[in-house]
Image (cartoon, rainbow, N blue to C red):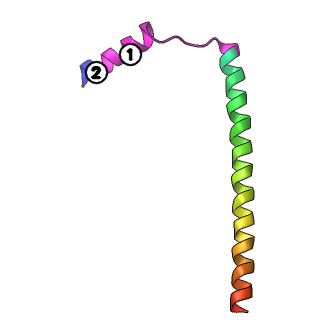
Amino acid sequence: MLTYVKESFEELKNNVTWLNREKASNLMVVVAVFSILFALATWGVDSLFSKLITLYFEQVIG
């Protein structure tokens, strides 16, 4: 297990290409915006289905 952890850190230090701070910040903003938009879309669909199900059961039950 210890060997695995050591090799993993070596891999991160030597073989991974890291983004510069500016590009990483820009990508973070893009991910945040799309996450918010996806959350709003999910909330909208959930609200719509909730209203449709409520309307359906009000019509069926009376």
Q: Image point 52% across, 10% down: which residue?
A: 17
The amino acid on which the numbered mark 2 sits, given as a three-letter code, is Tyr
Mark 1 secondary-structure assignment: helix
The amino acid on which the numbered mark 1 sits, given as a three-letter code, is Phe
Residue where numbered disc 1 is placed = 9
Q: Reply above or below: 43 against 15.
A: below
Nearer the observer, 61 or 39: 61
Nearer the observer, 60 or 17: 60
Give, as a single range, the part of the protein colored magenta: 4-22
Q: Image point 71% across, 80% down: which residue?
A: 56
Residue where numbered disc 2 is placed = 4
Q: In this view, does 38 lie to the left or right of 2?
A: right
What is the crowding at mark 1: few (fewer than 14 residues within 10 Å), some, or many (at least 20)?
few
Q: Reply above or below: 37 against 47.
A: above
Q: In this view, does 26 lie to the left or right of 3?
A: right
Q: Earlier in the sequence, mark 1 or mark 2?
A: 2
Nearer the observer, 38 or 11: 38
